[in-house]
Amino acid sequence: MCLFQILTNAIASFPFAAINLYRALTTQEVQTQDQENIVQFLRVMAIWLFYVQYCSDFYIYVSTSTEVRAAAAKILCFWNRRWNVDHTNELKSHCYDVNSSKDQCN
C-alpha cells in the first residue's frame, strides 16, 4: 500500500515540479503568446494532477486493504437497499416529529 502511495505521489508531483523549474529557468527569455499559452496550459494540467494525488489515497486504501474496503462498504451502504429505505423513513418521521412543517425536511 505504501509503495502505491509513493508511486502515485511521485508521478503526480513530477510534472508540477518540472513545469515550475522550466518557468524559473526561462523567465529571462522572451516568449511568444502561443508559447506562453502552452506553458500555462501545461502548468494548469500539472496543478490538476498535483491535486489528484490527495484524492487517490482513498482509492489506494480501498483497492489494497480488505478491512478498509469492508469499512467503506459499510459506510456507503450501497449494497443493502432495505437498510437505506428503513433509515430514510426513520429519519423522515423523526424530522416530521421535530418540525411542524414537512417542507423543512425535504
Image (spheres, helix red, strand yellow):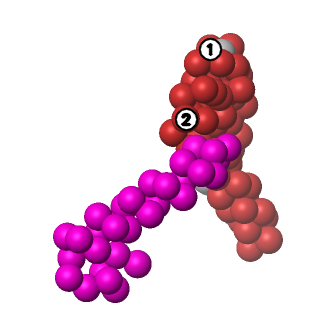
Residue 68 in view, yes or no: yes
- The image shows residue 103 at horizontal and vertical percentages of 34, 85
Q: Nearer the viewer, residue 72 or 88?
A: 88
- The image shows residue 56 at horizontal and vertical percentages of 63, 36
Q: Nearer the viewer, residue 43 or 71?
A: 71
Residue hosting label 2:
74
Q: Amino acid at mark 2?
A: Lys
Quarter occupied by the N terminus: top right
Residue lying at 21% horizontally and 76% vertically, measured from the top left: 99
Q: Taking 47 as reference, is 102 left or right?
A: left
Residue lying at 55% horizontally and 35% vertically, measured from the top left: 74
Tell me where residue 32 sits by quadrant: bottom right
Q: Amino acid at mark 1?
A: Cys
- Separation of residues labelled 2 and 1 (CA atoms): 24 Å
Q: Is residue 105 magenta?
A: yes
The magenta segment is 77-106
Residue hosting label 1:
2
